[in-house]
Image: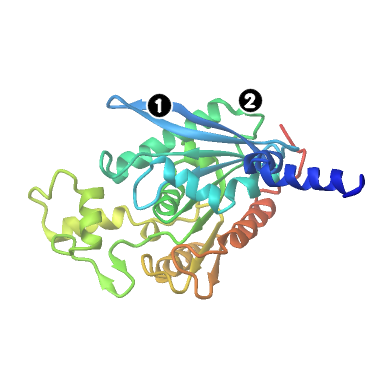
């Protein structure tokens, strides 16, 4: 073995034994703050993680509704991390606030919306600290998180925290709980979707409500049925092979938005399930859409 070969072997051995996290740390586009308590409800702390860009900031914020199957455990943030959401958005200069609005085991849908808005209020209150424009924010979610994002955006009243959202991007969200694909929901008896809707909207039971009153309440919490002309622009990304949330759920919401003269776009992922292995590619497409819709400019700041 000559003297030139030995240094090469040493370098190769160093690369083999070097922990993966060292390389990962060098590649991260964000700094993560975990478990920030933004409010308290019934003795439960409501939490969010904040992802700030390690590169140049564009001065804009994205609120990411970290909720799947109407559960907001830490695994939902990890799912979004695996999908490349924080790498992609922070890499473009966005500060991302991953709000956990609570789980169906403790909270109803109205309570989750209220919790989400408390998180949004916290973001607005801390806009100066994070150097973001609180009047030009984006809202993002997937699946149940997409449902909550849609509902919050279309029901926002003037002056409310949710009125600050100027663009909404969602993946495969439920939007019409009465007509779910080919299923006409019977909330009293349906053993599948009906079970979830009962827990979300009728946690204390039906009382003396008749079928018409039940349907009216379900419609009230179906984003596709609450659209008005004041809604912000939307982007939907949905797979045409989704086994859990039919593509029809995004289609009807887009139709309702366009009928109200609101900008709405649907990107269909051929063969896409819930989610799909290459979803990071669509996350990048969504980030580009936010750039265009929010008129983002790297280094814009406040």
Disc 1 crowd rating (10 Å Cα; few below 14, some 14-19, many 20+) is some
| Residue 89, position as x, y percentages in the image | 64, 47
At horizontal 14% and vertical 60% (from top left) the residue drawn is 188
Question: From the viewer's perspective, is 57 left or right of 41?
Answer: right
| Residue 282, position as x, y percentages in the image | 59, 62
At horizontal 59% and vertical 51% (from top left) the residue drawn is 84
In front: mark 2 or mark 1? 1
Q: Quadrant of residue 197?
A: bottom left
Asked which secondary structure carries label 1, the reply is strand
Depicted 279 relative to depicted 84: above or below: below
Depicted 219 relative to depicted 125: above or below: below
| Residue 193, position as x, y percentages in the image | 25, 61
Mark 2 and mark 1 lie on one chain; the one further toward the N terminus is 1
Tag of residue 39? 1
Disc 2 crowd rating (10 Å Cα; few below 14, some 14-19, many 20+) is few
Task: Name the residue that disc number 2 marks.
Answer: 128
At horizontal 59% and vertical 58% (from top left) the residue drawn is 280
Asked which secondary structure carries label 2, the reply is helix
Q: Quadrant of residue 278?
A: bottom right
Q: Is residue 226 visible?
A: yes
Tag of residue 246? none
Q: Quadrant of the C terminus?
A: top right
């Amino acid at each position: 073995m000559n003297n030139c070969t030995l240094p090469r072997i040493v370098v190769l051995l160093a690369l083999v034994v070097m922990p993966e996290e060292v390389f990962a740390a060098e590649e991260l586009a964000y700094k993560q703050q975990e478990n920030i308590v933004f409010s308290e409800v019934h003795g439960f702390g409501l939490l969010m993680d904040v992802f700030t860009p390690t590169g140049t900031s564009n001065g804009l914020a994205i609120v990411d509704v970290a909720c799947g199957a109407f559960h907001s455990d830490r695994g939902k943030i990890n799912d979004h991390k695996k999908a490349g959401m924080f790498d992609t958005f922070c890499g473009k200069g966005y500060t991302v606030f991953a709000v956990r609005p609570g789980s169906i085991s403790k909270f109803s849908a109205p309570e989750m919306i209220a919790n989400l808005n408390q998180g949004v209020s916290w973001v607005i209150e801390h806009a100066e600290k994070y150097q973001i424009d609180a009047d030009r924010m984006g809202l993002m979610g997937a699946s149940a998180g997409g449902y909550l994002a849609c509902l919050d955006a279309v029901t926002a009243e003037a002056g409310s925290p949710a009125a600050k959202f100027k663009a909404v991007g969602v993946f495969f969200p439920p939007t019409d709980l009465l007509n779910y694909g080919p299923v006409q929901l019977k909330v009293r008896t349906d053993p599948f979707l009906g079970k979830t809707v009962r827990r979300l909207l009728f946690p204390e039971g039906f009382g003396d409500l008749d079928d018409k009153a039940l349907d009216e309440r379900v419609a009230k919490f179906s984003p596709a049925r609450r659209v008005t002309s004041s809604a912000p622009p939307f982007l939907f990304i949905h797979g045409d092979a989704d086994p859990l949330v039919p593509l029809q759920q995004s289609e009807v919401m887009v139709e309702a938005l366009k009928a109200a003269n609101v900008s709405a776009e649907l990107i269909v992922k051929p063969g896409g399930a819930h989610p799909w292995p290459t979803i990071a590619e669509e996350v990048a497409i969504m980030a580009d859409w936010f750039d265009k819709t929010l008129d983002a400019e790297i280094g814009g700041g406040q």
